Amino acid sequence: MSNMGVMSTCFCVRSFVHLLRPGVQKMGYFQMHTASRCAAKNHYEVLVLGGGSGGITMSARMKRKVGAENVAVVEPNEKHYYQPMWTLVGAGAKQLATSGRPTASVIPSGVKWIKSSVTELDPDKNCIHLADDKKISYKYLIIALGLQLHYEKIKGLPEGFNYPKIGSNYSVHTVEKTWKALQDFKEGNAIFTFPNTPVKCGGAPQKIMYLSEAYLRKTGKRSKANIIFNTSLGSIFTVQKYADRLLEIIKARNIVVNYKCNLIEVRADKQEAVFENLDTPGVTEVYQYEMLHVTPPMGPPDVLMNSPVSDAAGWLDLDKETLQHKKYPNVFGIGDCTNLPTSKTAAAIAAQSAVLDKTISSVMKSQLPTKKYDGYTSCPIVTDYNRVILAEFDYNSQPLETFPIDQSKERLLMYYMKADLMPFLYWNGLLKGYWGGPAPIRNLMHLGFK
């Protein structure tokens, strides 16, 4: 925090949130709360928590709205990663180095980077507390803190990653271990897991399974491999259209799927994985593995747990259409840390950013937000080294496809979109606040019809 200069002592000035206006209380849309502000030196008009996809995107959009000098981003990490690429990194199709850039390079120019962690949220006083005991106040707060990986909730992890044969595409520290385990595969079980928690990119746990199966085919090892997908879910995918096609692929490639099967322990020294049957709690089964890909349990960041802005489960409690907080009218959220009932993907963040931009504009003008988020998200399901099923859907798990073709089919074009176009669009469109999802393209392709 030395780059912030001398920070003055935080003091409180009682006032009412400026967003309140006649008729609003009657509508139940805003709730009045007492506000306090810190000294102006530690105050920003828009404060963004998190320097991931959602945080950088919204800081770029807010810069154009209120000016760079009035926006700050709180983010402790020196490196920013395009995590969707890790599916291909784990399968040897991309290099890890190409997925990351210095955080300083993605913070919009002129926007203040507060290199620290948030330790407490105090929305009643319009303040946040940082790890170094400093306080920052805000007029508007955007929470984009992502989610937390919990490898430690699986007995034997994360220390088990010190052994070979085990990897995970969900962490920068373990994604290359997946590729090493795949290369070193000889014969036996190749097991892929899906935890009993919300996860980011719900298709990723099976994407690496399809790629691994393809790799073993190409290297002549497939006949010696048992490909097993042990998932805590009751179905292969939430959208029936894509689920039907994936089940066809699974059958054609002789892949075994075990539902309601949750990983609870890894005995890495013995190459054993222990799974609990969720339909009969307490009943476990031990699998020997030659390769194990772990998708860890996930949850909200610690700072959101039991905070005033979170729901009972610890997720940021938002209106699912406007992305405005249900209680605090000057607090907003985006991305994986929210309780929005849609898949947690970069594509969802893109669509959310366009809606949130409009919502904040309305609130700044003391108007009711009218732009609504329909839950759009996308999951490019990589099924081979040159094939992708482009799943796109809404809150109701109904297909919401961009192109006037059947996107449930495996296509070469969609693979190149996933591998090359989407990373370019991420760095040069989304993070700069110019890409708000494919809705305009979809409208054009479908002549305005959904």
Image: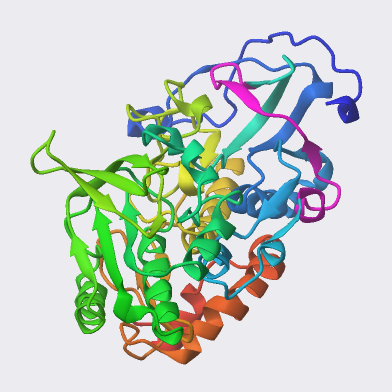
2 or 290: nearer the viewer:
290
Location of residue 388 (image quadrant)? bottom left
Indicate left or right for 41 with 200 as reference.
right
- Does the rendering let one see residue 151? yes
Quarter of the image where the C terminus is located: bottom left
Q: Where is residue 133? Give x, y as percent.
A: 72, 14
Q: Where is residue 184? Give x, y as percent.
A: 50, 67
Placement of 137 over or under 15, stated as above or below: below
Residue sitting at 23 percent across and 44 percent down? 275
Residue at the left extreme, as displayed: 280
- Total numbered labels placed on residues in the image: 0
- Does the rendering let one see residue 150? no
Q: Which contiguous range is marked in magenta?
A: 103-127
Location of residue 82 (image quadrant)? bottom right
Indicate left or right for 141 with 329 as reference.
right
Is residue 289 found inside the magenta-colored segment of the image? no
285 or 404: nearer the viewer:
285
Indicate left or right for 357 with 256 as reference.
right
Q: How is the image coloured?
A: rainbow
Q: Where is residue 332? Give x, y as percent.
A: 52, 39
Placement of 44 over or under 335, stated as above or below: above
Residue sitting at 46 percent across and 60 percent down? 348
Q: Where is residue 47? Give x, y as percent.
A: 68, 35
Location of residue 206 (image quadrant)? bottom left
Quarter of the image where the N terminus is located: top right
Residue sitting at 36 percent across and 86 percent down? 410
